[in-house]
Amino acid sequence: MLKMFTTQLTGVWKKIDEKEEFSFEDGARLLAQAPVGDGSIYIFGTKEMKAVEVEALDGAEPFVGAKVLTAADVAELGEADRVLMFTRTSGDEDALAVAKQLREKGVPFVAVSTVMEPDAADHLVGMADVHIDLRLTKGLLPDDFGNRYGYPSSMAALFVYYGLKFTIDEMLAEYEE
């Protein structure tokens, strides 16, 4: 089972890399505007996506200058700040509530989630300045009853986080030269 899971997870990462290549660049460019200006990059994760917040702040290679965003903190954000939001699906109620506040305040943000209803303007895809699709619509492994399990949303989110972080770090290094 582990070999099958590894193969499927590698396929998810490859699909994200191939299908979201331009969104990675656009998202990193948007987020990099904060440290170049007078803003900060805030990270917001719902449910299991809080793993990204922990990795960004307390991991072996912290995201320098990044801060965790809580729903209560949104009122304090300014136009120079940027938000990187992670949630399981594009219709997550907690993420949508924060996204609406960000839009009202004019704070640009990048959202990372699986698109469940691509045409819904009230979902993150329509609200975010840049959206990266995790492409995890079901579990990766079949069981004996035709169901699927093994839904590695936080692993996919961490893959996206590192892709964005590496790209931002490269952009900022070029800017400082």
Image (cartoon, rainbow, N blue to C red):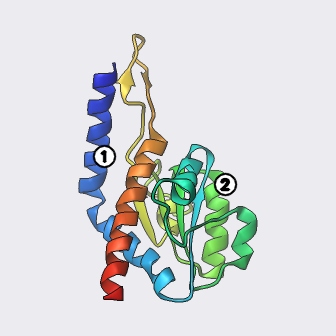
The percent coordinates of residue 117 (x first, y second) are 47, 51
The percent coordinates of residue 141 (x first, y second) are 37, 24
Q: Give the CA separation, mark 1 to mark 2.
A: 26 Å
The residue under the point 49% across, 81% down is 35
User: In the displayed image of the protein, which residue is found farthest to the front?
Assistant: 60
User: In the displayed image of the protein, which residue is found farthest to the right?
Assistant: 72
Q: Which one is in front, 170 or 26?
A: 170
Q: Which one is in front, 81 or 147?
A: 81
Mark 1 residue element? helix
Left or right: 15, with 60 as reference point: left
Left or right: 88, with 142 as reference point: right
**Amino acid under disc 2:** Asp
Q: Is residue 115 visible?
A: no
State the quadrant of the N terminus: top left
On residue 110, the disc is: none
Q: Quadrant of residue 26?
A: bottom left
On residue 94, the disc is: 2
Q: Earlier in the sequence, mark 1 or mark 2?
A: 1
The percent coordinates of residue 104 (x first, y second) are 65, 78
Q: Badge 1 local density, few (<14 within 10 Å), some, or many (20+)?
A: some
The residue under the point 30% across, 31% down is 6
In front: label 1 or label 2: 1
Please determine whether, in this image, residue 1 is positioned above or below residue 53.
Answer: above
Q: Badge 2 local density, few (<14 within 10 Å), some, or many (20+)?
A: few
Please determine whether, in this image, residue 29 is positioned above or below residue 163.
Answer: below
**Amino acid under disc 1:** Trp
The residue under the point 58% across, 78% down is 107
Mark 2 residue element? helix
The residue under the point 37% across, 80% down is 172
Residue wearing tag 1? 13
